Image: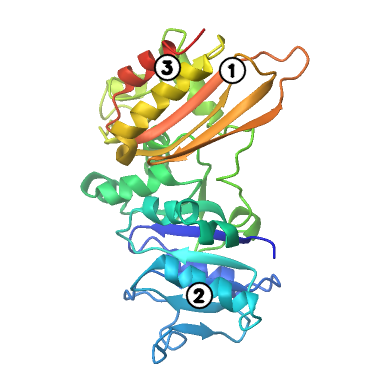
C-alpha cells in the first residue's frame, strides 16, 4: 500500500482554518480526505457532523471524507485509521490534521518520523499556517505559539487582508519573512485556495530545491557586507525601512522566532560538520523549528541535502552537481532565539 500523505493545518484562533478545511472538503476533487481535529473548539467543521457518541469518534461523511477528533493520542488515531484503511473498513486518500490554535506543530510533525509504524503508513507532506491579517500583529507580539506556527510553515496563507490597509499587509509580510523566508506567502479570501496550493507541496521531501524567498535575500544582501557566510536579517537589522519608525510602513518587531542563512563556496568537511550539527541539535534542538540545506561536501560529486525539525535531522545524497555549476552550500535555520554567531562561526570552522 502506498504511503498516505498527511498535511498539518495550523494557525491562530479565528484565522480561518475551519473555513479553509470546509472548502477543501466540499470541493469535488474526487479525493477522500480523513480529517483529524485536535480539539473540540467552538469552531468545528460542523457540529452536527461531529457527533461524538461513538467511542472511536470517527465519522464517515456523505462525500467520503472522514472526521475524527482526538483528545488522546495522535499516534493511536493515525494507527487506527491506517489499520482500518488496510482492512478495507475505511476508504480515504489523505489525512489533514487540524491543530488547536495554541498548538506547537513540532511534536505533531515529529510523530511522523519518530514512530516506525506511522512512518511505514504515512508521508508527512507539509505544514500549512493561516495568519489573520487583522489580528496578526497582536497575536505575534503576545503569543509565542503564533510565532512558532509561522516558523514551522511550508506555506503561509494570510486571511482577512480585505479588512486591513495594503501597507499593513505589506508590513505583516515583511515581518513574517524575517521569521520564515522559506515559506511562500499568499493572501486568501474566505478559504478560497486552489487545492494545488494545499496538497502535495512536498515540504518535507529531501530535495535539492531550497526555497528561500529570493526578494528577501536580495534585500538582505544589499544591506550587509559579503562574508564567507552572508549574515541574514536578525536582531541587528539595519534595513532602511527599520531605521525611521513611522516613516516606512515596516515597524521593527524583535520577534524571538528568526531566520538566518549560511552560505559558502568552500566545501564542508563531512566529519566536522556532522559533529558540529550533532552538538547544536543536542543543545538547541527544542528551539530549532525548521532547518534545511543544500550542501557542497568534500568527497562527493553529488549535492547533499539535509533538513530537520527540532532534534530530528536527516540527510540524503541529491543529484550530481551540473557541469560548470557553481558548487556552494546554502543553509537556512529558523528558530527561537538561536545564537546566530555561534552557528555561523561553527559552520565556518567545518569548511575545508
Query: Going 27% across and 22% down the picture, which residue do you hit?
Result: 244
107 to 182, vertically: above or below:
below
275 to 32, vertically: above or below:
above
Badge 1 crowding class, 10 Å Cα cut-off, few under 14, some 14 to 19, many 20 or more, is many
The image quarter in which residue 275 lies: top left
Where is the N terminus found, in terms of image quarters?
A: bottom right
Residue 80 tag number? 2
Question: Which comes sooner in the sequence, label 3 or label 2?
Answer: 2
Query: Going 23% across and 44% down the picture, which residue do you hit?
Result: 141
Question: Which comes sooner in the sequence, label 1 or label 3?
Answer: 1
Residue that protrudes farthest toward the bottom in the picture:
53
Question: Would you say residue 79 is visible in this rendering?
Answer: yes
Question: Would you say residue 165 is visible in this rendering?
Answer: no
Query: Going 71% across and 73% down the picture, which residue do you hit?
Result: 30
Which residue is labeled 3 in the image?
Answer: 347
Element type at mark 1: loop
Spatial distance from mark 2 to mark 1, Cα to Cα? 42 Å
On the picture, is 335 further left or further right than 98?
Answer: left
Please tell me whether mark 3 or mark 2 is closer to you in this view: 2
Residue that protrudes farthest toward the right in the picture:
323
Residue 38 location in percent, x, y?
38, 69
Spatial distance from mark 1 to mark 3, Cα to Cα? 13 Å
183 to 110, vertically: above or below:
above
Residue 347 location in percent, x, y?
42, 17
Which residue is labeled 1 in the image?
Answer: 297
Badge 3 crowding class, 10 Å Cα cut-off, few under 14, some 14 to 19, many 20 or more, is many
On the picture, is 92 further left or further right than 222?
Answer: right
Amino acid at each position: 500500500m502506498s504511503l498516505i500523505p498527511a498535511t498539518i493545518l495550523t494557525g491562530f484562533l479565528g484565522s480561518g482554518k475551519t473555513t479553509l478545511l470546509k472548502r477543501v472538503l466540499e470541493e469535488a476533487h474526487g479525493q477522500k480526505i480523513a480529517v483529524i481535529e485536535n480539539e473540540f473548539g467552538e469552531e468545528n467543521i460542523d457540529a452536527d457532523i461531529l457527533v461524538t457518541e461513538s467511542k472511536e469518534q470517527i465519522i464517515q461523511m456523505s462525500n467520503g471524507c472522514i472526521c475524527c477528533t482526538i483528545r488522546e493520542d495522535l499516534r493511536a488515531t493515525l494507527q487506527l485509521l491506517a489499520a482500518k484503511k488496510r482492512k478495507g473498513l475505511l476508504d480515504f486518500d489523505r489525512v489533514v490534521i487540524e491543530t488547536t490554535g495554541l498548538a506547537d506543530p513540532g511534536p505533531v510533525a515529529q510523530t511522523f518520523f519518530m514512530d516506525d509504524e506511522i512512518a511505514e503508513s504515512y508521508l508527512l507532506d507539509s505544514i500549512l499556517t493561516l495568519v489573520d491579517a487583522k489580528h496578526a500583529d497582536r497575536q505575534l507580539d503576545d503569543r509565542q505559539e503564533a510565532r512558532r506556527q509561522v516558523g514551522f510553515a511550508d506555506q503561509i496563507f494570510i486571511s482577512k487582508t480585505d479588512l486591513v490597509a495594503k501597507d499593513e499587509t505589506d508590513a505583516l509580510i515583511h515581518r513574517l519573512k524575517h521569521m520564515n523566508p522559506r515559506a511562500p506567502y499568499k493572501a486568501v479570501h474566505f478559504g478560497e485556495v486552489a487545492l494545488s496550493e494545499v496538497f502535495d507541496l512536498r515540504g518535507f521531501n529531501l530535495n535539492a530545491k531550497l526555497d528561500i524567498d529570493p526578494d528577501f535575500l536580495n534585500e538582505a544582501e544589499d544591506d550587509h557586507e559579503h562574508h564567507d557566510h552572508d549574515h541574514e536579517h536578525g536582531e541587528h537589522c539595519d534595513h532602511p525601512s527599520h531605521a525611521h519608525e513611522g516613516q516606512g510602513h515596516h515597524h521593527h518587531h524583535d520577534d524571538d522566532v528568526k531566520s538566518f542563512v549560511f552560505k559558502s563556496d568552500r566545501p564542508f568537511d563531512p566529519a566536522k560538520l556532522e559533529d558540529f550539527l550533532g552538538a547544536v541539535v543536542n543543545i538547541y534542538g527544542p528551539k530549532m523549528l525548521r532547518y534545511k540545506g543544500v550542501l557542497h561536501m568534500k568527497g562527493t560529486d553529488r549535492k547533499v541535502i539535509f533538513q530537520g525539525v527540532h532534534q530530528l535531522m536527516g540527510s540524503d545524497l541529491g543529484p550530481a552537481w551540473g557541469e560548470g555549476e557553481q558548487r556552494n552550500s546554502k543553509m537556512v535555520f529558523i528558530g527561537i532565539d538561536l545564537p546566530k554567531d555561534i552557528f555561523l562561526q561553527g559552520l565556518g570552522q567545518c569548511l575545508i
